[in-house]
Image (spheres, grey):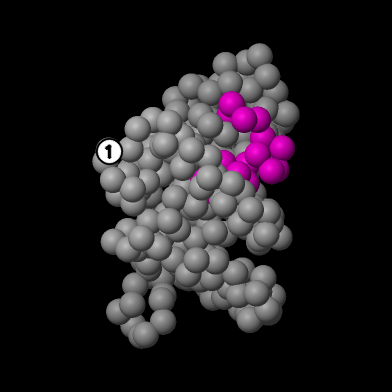
């Protein structure tokens, strides 16, 4: 099922793993081939990387996005989707969007800052390198800085800014550690499915907090499989269109055959 990307969370065009220069194009190709079902050994040959590098790109990206998705879900911000499939039009390699994030209140800004740092915290906790996590979280860091300025005023000097960043990173790391089982679950599911939609993420959060069971997730996925099969029968692809409240009081996602 194809995802219509609407988020901003990407690796810079140049990053480094071991001694091999890995460009944004290489990472995009790796993630795109992986999502199509290509084996790691074949991806390595096509992209010009080692199998280990291919695996590390996928793992680091999955945990980074899982950190964002898990924290967003715990905050009740309803992550609309999480994906490891690159968008060819925007150069976004992976992303998570939230539909209920509140950037008008102090509490909402604090949650946004924690969420920004959660991706890097999860990636590091999963064994990623500090350099890679910082490169991958460059946009996250800038968003967090903007939120800190809104919270504490534009007149923040660099020393105070760095102190606040350190403080909020520690808060994010504590939250990621506290909810690590949910982060791991989402990362594993991303590595397996490449894209997770609104209801999947919400049910995983609910399973983690004891509100729902695996049977609920299986039932949802049976429904999604039917949508996919119906579109396939028409010679089309099931395209996820995002969340909608149009059909009832509860959050829902919408699909179309294209």
Could you tell me if residue 91 is visible in this image? yes
The rendered magenta stretch, by its main secondary structure, is classed as helix
What residue lies at 54% left-to-right and 59% top-to-bottom? 71
| Count of marks, rendered view | 1
Provide residue 51's location: percent of width, then percent of height: 72, 28
What residue lies at 48% left-to-right and 38% top-to-bottom? 163
- Which region shows up in magenta? 117-132
From this view, report whether residue 159 is shown above or below residue 126: above
What residue lies at 36% left-to-right and 85% top-to-bottom? 248
Of residues 143 and 255, the one nearer the viewer is 143
| Residue closest to the far bottom | 248
Provide residue 252's location: percent of width, then percent of height: 41, 75
Provide residue 211's location: percent of width, then percent of height: 63, 81
Mark 1 highlights which residue? 155
Which quadrant of the view contains residue 158?
top left
From this view, report whether residue 123 is shown above or below residue 230: above
From this view, report whether residue 190 is shown above or below residue 59: below
Horizontal relation, residue 93 to residue 63: left or right: left
Magenta stretch contains residue 241: no
User: Please, what secondary structure does the residue beneath circle 1 have?
Assistant: loop
Of residues 25 and 204, the one nearer the viewer is 204
Provide residue 117's location: percent of width, then percent of height: 51, 45
Horizontal relation, residue 181 to residue 141: left or right: right
Which quadrant of the view contains residue 37?
top right
Could you tell me if residue 67 is visible in this image? no
Magenta stretch contains residue 127: yes
Query: Dot 1, crowdedness within 10 Å: few (<14), some or many (≥20)?
Result: few
What residue lies at 61% left-to-right and 20% top-to-bottom? 48
Pick the quarter of the image with the C terminus: bottom left
Horizontal relation, residue 190 to residue 239: left or right: right
Horizontal relation, residue 110 to residue 184: left or right: left
């Amino acid at each position: 099922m194809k995802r219509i990307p609407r988020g901003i969370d990407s690796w810079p065009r140049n990053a480094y793993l071991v001694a091999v220069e890995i460009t944004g194009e290489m990472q995009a190709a790796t993630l795109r081939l992986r999502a199509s079902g290509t084996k790691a050994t074949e991806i390595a040959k096509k992209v010009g990387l080692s199998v280990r590098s291919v695996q590390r790109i996928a793992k680091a990206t999955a945990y980074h996005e899982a950190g964002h998705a898990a924290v967003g879900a715990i905050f009740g911000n309803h992550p609309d989707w999480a994906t490891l499939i690159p968008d060819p039009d925007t150069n976004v390699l992976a992303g998570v969007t939230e539909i209920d994030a509140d950037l008008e209140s102090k509490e909402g800004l604090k949650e946004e800052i924690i969420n920004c740092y959660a991706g890097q915290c999860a990636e590091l906790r999963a064994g990623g390198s500090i350099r890679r996590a910082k490169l991958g979280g460059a946009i996250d860091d800038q968003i967090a800085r903007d939120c800190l300025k809104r919270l504490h005023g534009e007149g923040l000097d660099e020393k105070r800014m760095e102190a606040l960043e350190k403080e909020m990173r520690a808060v994010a790391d504590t939250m990621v550690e506290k909810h690590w089982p949910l982060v791991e679950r989402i990362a594993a599911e991303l590595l397996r499915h490449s894209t997770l939609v609104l209801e999947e993420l919400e049910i995983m959060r609910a399973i983690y907090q004891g509100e729902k069971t695996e049977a609920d997730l299986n039932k949802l996925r049976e429904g999604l499989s039917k949508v996919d099969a119906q579109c396939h029968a028409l010679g089309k692809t099931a395209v996820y269109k995002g969340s909608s409240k149009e059909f009832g009081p509860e959050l829902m996602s919408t699909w179309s055959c294209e």
